[in-house]
Image (cartoon, helix red, strand yellow):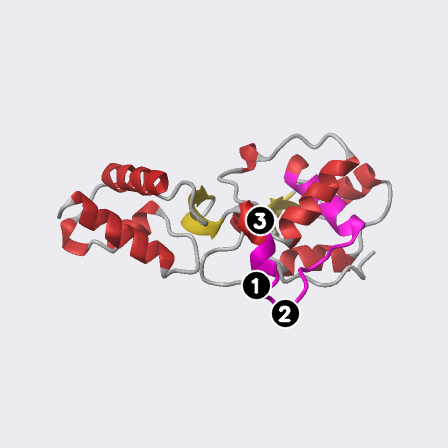
Amino acid sequence: MKENEVQRILEAVLLCTREPLSIQQLRKAFGSFELSADIIKGHLAALQQSWQGRGLDLVQVASGWRFQNRADIQPYLLRLQNDKPARYSRATLETLAIIAWRQPVTRGDIEDIRGVGVSTQIIRTLEDRGWIEVLGYRDAPGKPALFGTTKQFLDDLSLRSIQDLPALDSTQDIDAIQQALAEPQQDHSDYAPSAKGTDSQDK
């Protein structure tokens, strides 16, 4: 199979799929040709280069590779949607930030850091959105659940791993998280931002 044909197939597969695709999934698209992971990665790098400066970027996130709109295109896409981006309360974002930067943490850990209680609704909101999950249970009385972030959380922030999170130094960083999660970089197939969490009524 010629190199340009491999890139055409990769481009089509990624443009026609809503979710990020891993290298292994992309290899399956080529069936009996059995292209190696290194060959696929090389073609993805070349394809990524060829899309520079256009309205879409080919990016690698936690779950794999996907096309998404560039940040400067976002305002134009938002004008075409009917629903407003989801907004999250300060308490919800602070809870999410603590989980993301201190994970794994228990609900008690979060309450110790914030200095106030964490409502069940906040935890449920973050779980329903797919941003946090139970990673295990602490070996302590009551076996409290240990929370951590998910691949979906990383995907919505266009990050490859938790190590790519920026330093959280001020309250302004919480505001940046709000904007990034409420209006994530959209993939090519849907004008509506993927954040569909509840309204900011939780405390």
Instruction: Tell me where residue 201 appears, x and y as whole percent.
Output: 81, 62
Q: Secondary structure at mark 2?
A: loop
Q: Of label 1 and label 3, which has the lower sequence position? A: 3
Q: What x and y, as percent, mark residue 187?
A: 48, 55
Would you name the residue on which mark 1 appears?
192
Q: Label 1 amino acid?
A: Ala
Q: Would you say residue 75 is visible in this rendering?
A: yes
- Viewer can see residue 141: no
The kind of residue tagged 3 is: Phe
Q: Is residue 90 left or right of residue 59?
A: right
Q: Is residue 44 left or right of residue 70?
A: left
Point out residue 112 in the picture as x, y percentages from the top left corner.
82, 38
Q: CA distance from mark 3 to mark 2?
A: 24 Å
User: Crowding at label 1, few (<14), some or many (≥20) Cα neighbours within 10 Å?
Assistant: some
Which span is picked out in magenta?
Answer: 75-100
In the picture of the structure, the residue carrying the numbered disc 2 is 82
Quarter the C terminus occupies: bottom right
Element class at badge 3: helix
Q: Residue at x 27, y 41 (%)?
A: 43
Task: Residue 113: give x, y in percent of width and height.
Answer: 80, 37
Residue closest to the far bottom = 82
Badge 3 is on which residue? 153
Residue 115: image quadrant is top right
Q: Residue at x 63, y 62 (%)?
A: 196
Mark 2 and mark 1 lie on one chain; the one further toward the N terminus is 2
Q: Is residue 141 magenta?
A: no
Note whether 14 is above or below 50 in the view shown.
below
Q: Amino acid at mark 2?
A: Asn
